[in-house]
Image (spheres, rainbow, N blue to C red):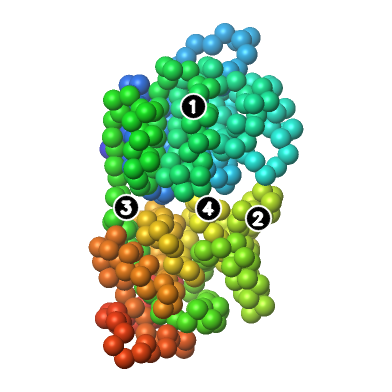
């Protein structure tokens, strides 16, 4: 199917064509028609499936077709809530891209920066607001934001908001919205708390599910290294000596750990920067831009800071620490292998992390290949201890596939 079949107005089709977009993704194909009809929608989709366009395009089209008096003030008609600053910025950019021919105005607000530039922009009037919950509540309480005219409400990355303790903030924001509106909720997973929120928020929603959380992208080449915790930094440096690893997004469980990884890499002559919640918004955005522009080869991130990062042609994801939640593993490795490209996901696993690895393999319903040929192997366990049955893998295969393209 092509975008022409989705009954989109010409200004949006021209904007999509200018970006080289001709065919909708699965979630766009399934979500756009019912959203254009005014239905509520719940989308189960992970990062990288094209869900932003799935809700942005219908919102833009419906707002563009509304008649507004030339001199009437702009009122916020669409509100998109998202958990992180980085994701908010990217969603705002998407609205600007798809709606560049429509004359609509969108704006992004988030915490961690001074509020005056944001309040000044809000005073001029906007049509579409993309926001993180904390800053939005602050500005609503200060009377800088009026949500009484919102017609379209999007709750994006709902499961991550739950992980970050934002659900109560979301509920507070809902009290400021009109009762009659079109609702859209997107989440990669559907824990019980999110299901309850769906039941209270959406009315007879259309349900769309693509790329189930249990099925990782087939083209992503996954492997695990068993390594002592103290040797992880040495193994990472060893791997990065291979220049076929063009770019690597490295995941750390903690902010302090991310900083230490960067310190060790820089000391070893590897260009690296960290991105996490303790960094200022300017520092985070600069680190992300440097990585996207290939000025920095390695970006070290925590899960919360990395949520929503969308990087073209990312060759490798490296799990320096395995995540405590198996679904997070799928989110992490989904940063690579996009747009039909191959990708490599490597994980480090020490003795204490073996149960986490088992949980991940149970979720994705496959054994992750074990790379035994490396200089920092895990010490042999005591007799009688259960060890994984290794699926032997040639280390070179996982590091050179990308270089052959």
Which mark is drawn over residue 174?
Answer: 1
Where is residue 256 drawn, in percent x and y? 62, 65
Q: Are marks 1 and 3 in contact (CB under 8 Å)?
A: no
Q: In this image, 179 relative to 191: left or right? A: right
Is there CB contact under 8 Å for labels 4 and 3? no
- Name the residue at 40% across, 58% down: 325
Residues 348 and 25: in front is 348
C-alpha span from label 1 to label 4? 23 Å
| Mark 2 burial class by Cα count in 10 Å: few <14, some 14-19, many 20+ | few
Residue 328: x %, y % from top left: 41, 57
**Badge 2 or badge 4: first in the primary sequence:** 2
Indicate the quadrant containing the C terminus: top left, top right, bottom left or bottom right.
bottom left
List the residue tagged with mark 4: 304
Q: Mark 2 or mark 1, which is nearer the start of the sequence? A: 1
Image point 37% across, 87% down: which residue?
381
Q: Secondary structure at mark 2?
A: loop
- Residue ID at (47%, 82%): 228
Q: What is the secondary structure assignment of the residue under circle 3?
A: loop
- Lower position in the chain sequence, tag 4 or tag 3: 3
Find the distance from the CA under tag 1 to the CA under tag 3: 28 Å
Q: Tell me what residue is drawn at x 48 percent, y 43 percent.
A: 161
Helix, strand or loop under label 1: helix
CB within 8 Å, label 2 to label 3: no
Residue wearing tag 2: 278
């Amino acid at each position: 199917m092509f975008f022409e079949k989705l009954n989109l107005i010409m200004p949006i089709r021209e904007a999509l064509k200018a970006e080289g977009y001709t065919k909708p993704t699965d979630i766009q194909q399934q979500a756009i028609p019912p959203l254009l009809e005014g239905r509520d929608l719940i989308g189960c989709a992970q990062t990288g499936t094209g869900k932003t366009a799935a809700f942005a395009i219908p919102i833009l089209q419906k707002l563009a077709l509304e008649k507004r008096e030339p001199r009437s003030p702009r009122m916020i008609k669409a509100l998109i809530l998202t958990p992180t600053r980085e994701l908010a910025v990217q969603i705002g950019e998407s609205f600007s891209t798809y709606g560049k021919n429509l004359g609509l105005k969108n704006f992004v607000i988030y915490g961690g920066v001074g509020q005056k530039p944001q309040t000044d922009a809000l005073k001029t009037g906007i049509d579409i607001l993309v926001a993180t919950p904390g800053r939005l509540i602050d500005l609503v309480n200060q009377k800088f934001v009026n949500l009484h005219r919102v017609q379209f409400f999007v709750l994006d990355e709902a499961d991550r908001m739950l992980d970050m303790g934002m659900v109560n903030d979301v509920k507070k924001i809902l009290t400021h919205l009109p009762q009659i509106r079109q609702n859209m909720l997107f989440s990669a997973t559907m824990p019980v708390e999110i299901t309850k929120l769906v039941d209270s928020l959406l009315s007879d929603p259309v349900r769309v599910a693509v790329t189930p959380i249990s099925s990782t992208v087939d083209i992503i080449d996954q492997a695990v290294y068993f390594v002592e915790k103290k040797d992880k930094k040495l193994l990472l440096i060893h791997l990065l000596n291979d220049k076929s690893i063009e770019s690597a997004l490295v995941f750390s469980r903690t902010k302090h750990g991310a900083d230490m990884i960067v310190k060790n890499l820089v000391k070893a002559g590897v260009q690296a920067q960290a991105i996490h919640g303790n960094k200022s918004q300017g520092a985070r955005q600069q680190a992300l831009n440097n990585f996207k522009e290939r000025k920095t080869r390695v970006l070290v991130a925590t899960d919360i800071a990395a949520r929503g990062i969308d990087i073209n042609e990312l060759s490798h994801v490296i799990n320096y620490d395995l995540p405590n939640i198996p679904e997070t593993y799928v989110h992490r490795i989904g940063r690579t292998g996009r747009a039909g490209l191959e990708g490599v996901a490597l994980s480090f696993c020490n003795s204490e992390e073996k149960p986490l690895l088992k949980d991940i393999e149970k979720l994705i319903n496959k054994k992750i290949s074990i790379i035994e040929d490396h200089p920092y192997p895990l010490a042999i366990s005591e007799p009688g201890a259960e060890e994984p049955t290794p699926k032997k893998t040639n280390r070179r295969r996982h590091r050179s596939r990308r270089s052959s393209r």
